[in-house]
Amino acid sequence: MKNVTIKDIANLAGVSETTVSLSFQPGSRISQATREKVLKIAHELRYVRNSVAQNLRGGRTKTIGFIVNDINNYIYHIMSKVATQIGNESGFQILYAETEWNPSKAIEVTKTMLEKQVEGFMLSLTEKEETSLDLIRHANVPHIVIDTIPSDYRGPYVINDEIRIGEIGATHFAELGCKRVAFFNATEEMSSFSAFTLQLEGFKSTLNSFGIAFDDNDVYYAGLTVEEGSKTFNNLLKQGPIPYDGILCVNDYVAYGVMQSAEKNGIKIGEDLALIGIDNLEFSALDRISLSSIAIDYHKLTSIAISRLIEAIEQPNGQLLKEVLEPQLIVRNSTNAFKKH
């Protein structure tokens, strides 16, 4: 796909290339009408300015843009370390940005990185950030999506098998002899993202195959943090005795919040209530916590993705990578002492 140039905009606007350039500069002596006309055409063509110095024209920036949803999440800390190490070994600098789960911010940081002429993108996105992908595809920049993908995405990716995550959790509960289980999901707004819907799909279908009843009333919108997990479990306690003997949480943070609340209320995790998290973060293995968790190898996921992205940058027109990684259950005290009722 041909990149849009200042010349293209000038031809459509009926002005000189200099006028187009000046239209992007606040305070320049260009009439408001001309400026608005130029900017409107630029927007329609999805033109992105090149803010890299002129002496780099025709050269290389040796940079890769890595866009994530929440840089404070520990899984992105793991990913960033791996990406930086492998990128540096190959002579690339990794530029990081976060969207804060905000589609508008995703567009903003994508445009900024395109202006900086990054040579490739590694992205962890949601369904609501399709416009960012459109900008990248339109600019013909190599990219790869990691961790999860929008449901209609057809480009290169390295992702987790989200359905298997739900299946593994449900199977473990069934093998423990659990009679009624719940799923502590992300927030209601985020629950429509493909990663969470696929986890829930695998969880529900597998429970049903074991004859364990489960419906929408057994799904709770907990969020993604320790505090939100604790609050959700506390709210459940206010309704009376806990009706569940097993809970699968959307991540280890939420599970730890449930654990904290349960212990304060005299509920023995691993005996009275089987509890499973997702991600297998380092703190889950601590003796004091010992949380059973469905492990996702973020080190491997990132290593494969960044390596193949660099290959695509250095050797264009190669085969697109589409790889799905298998999760693994790590059993610890939060389930292995469960008492069958």
Image: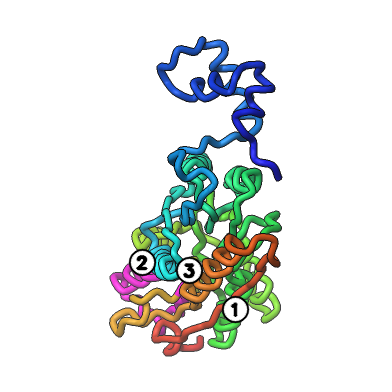
Coordinates of residue 98 in the picture (x, y in percent): 43, 50
Is residue 16 visible to us here? yes
Q: Residues within 10 Å of mark 2 (few under 14, many from 20)?
A: many
Q: Is residue 72 magenta?
A: no
Mark 1 — residue? 326
Viewer-nearest of labels 1 and 2?
A: 1
Residue shown at the point (43%, 40%) measured from the top left: 53
Q: Give the mark nearest the N terminus, 3 or 1.
A: 3
Three-letter amino acid code at the position of disc 1 = Glu
Q: Give the mark nearest the N terminus, 1 or 2.
A: 2
Is residue 68 visible to us here? no
Q: Give the mark nearest the N terminus, 2 or 3.
A: 3
Q: Which mark is residue 257?
A: 2
Coordinates of residue 339 in the picture (x, y in percent): 46, 88
Residue 334 vs residue 10: left or right? left
Task: Give the magenta-colored segment's residue range.
Answer: 253-279
Q: Where is the N terminus found, in terms of image quarters?
A: top right
Give residue 138's quadrant in the image: top right
Three-letter amino acid code at the position of disc 2 = Gly
